[in-house]
Image: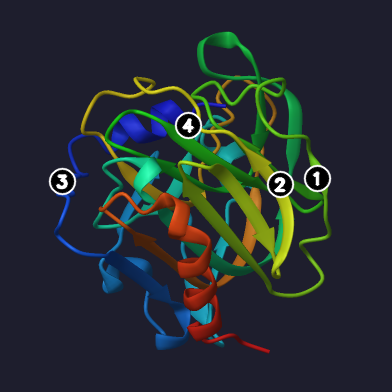
Amino acid sequence: MRIAGALIVLAGVVVSEVQAGAGILTQTYDAGLGTFPVDQGFTQTDTPDPGPPLVVQGGLLHQDTRGYRQSNFGAGYQFFSGQHAPADFTNGLQISMEMQVVESSYDPDFSGFGGTDSRSAGYGIIAVDDLGRIAVVGITDTGVFLNNEIEILDAEGSAFIPFDSTDSLHTYDVSISALGISLEIDGNPTASLQLGSTGQFPPNFGTIGFGDLFDDRFSAPTESVTDLAEFSYTILPEPAGILMMGFVGAVTMGRRRRS
């Protein structure tokens, strides 16, 4: 799973300078506004370029990579990154996404970065802090998983959690702090993992992104078809990880939900 390659593509684009004391940093993509992520301040990455067309209709961003990868030599990304990035995961980061999966495959024995035995999903959420730590949520049509290292190794991540992501819109809340990485789906605790090691990425190369993150360059295609309603993240640059759960609750209560 070549997430590393996807992020290297962004190396000349993403600037991540988050200074302590600068206050809470937050950004939202709302498909209900009828515009694309780039129109709301997110950076789009397509490899190879251009990627498959996007559609915004009925308050949803429709993303479909089926067929595109086979016709482009089995490789590709199409994802979106925010304007800000976390300086240090232990200070606190909250990510929330509301979406419905149509199709997003899972391969637990993927030949990933460096030829390692990795795991791959068509769609996901990724965050990297300025200390080089990574947090990944893989979302498929049959379940989800967490990983905290660059290789996305099956043995190093959480268990694969069976879940039907295709029946309706679901809300995925990811909390990252000194306590670790945790995932809730529709308010229900789903998976958790400790923070990974620093130095997996170059210093000061932080990013937060969502979309079709998983390259299939060395294996069968892992494609995704999704309808996204909203994606948002909030960075706490001050050391506040232990207070994160209370803050997440306030954010969740205040967030507009779609029926």
Image quarter (top left, top right, bottom left or bottom right) of the N terminus: top right
Residue 250 percent across, percent down from the top left: 49, 77
Q: Nearer the viewer, residue 35 or 167?
A: 167
CB atoms at circles 1 and 2 under 8 Å apart? yes
Task: Report which quarter residue 40 is drawn in.
Answer: bottom left
* Residue type, mark 4 in image: Ile
Residue marked by disc 3:
17
* Residue type, mark 2 in image: Ala
Which is more foreground, mark 1 or mark 2? 2
* Residue type, mark 1 in image: Ile
1 or 2: tag closer to the N-terminus: 1
Report if residue 50 is visible in the image: no
The Cα atoms of the two marked residues, 2 and 4, are separated by 21 Å
In the structure shown, which secondary structural element does the residue marked by tag 3 occupy? loop
Residue 47 percent across, percent down from the top left: 39, 39
Q: Which residue is depicted at the point 71% across and 46% down?
A: 191
3 or 2: tag closer to the N-terminus: 3
Q: Which residue is depicted at the point 70% across and 28% down?
A: 220
Residue occupying the far front of the picture? 242
Q: Which residue is depicted at the point 52% across and 17% down?
A: 113
Q: Nearer the viewer, residue 222 or 249?
A: 249
- Dot 4 alpha-carbon crowd within 10 angstroms: few under 14, some 14 to 19, many 20 or more: some
Residue 161: image tag: 1
The Cα atoms of the two marked residues, 3 and 2, are separated by 30 Å
In the structure shown, which secondary structural element does the residue marked by tag 2 occupy? strand
Q: Is residue 48 above or below residue 183?
A: above
Residue marked by disc 4:
3
Residue 191: image tag: 2
1 or 4: tag closer to the N-terminus: 4
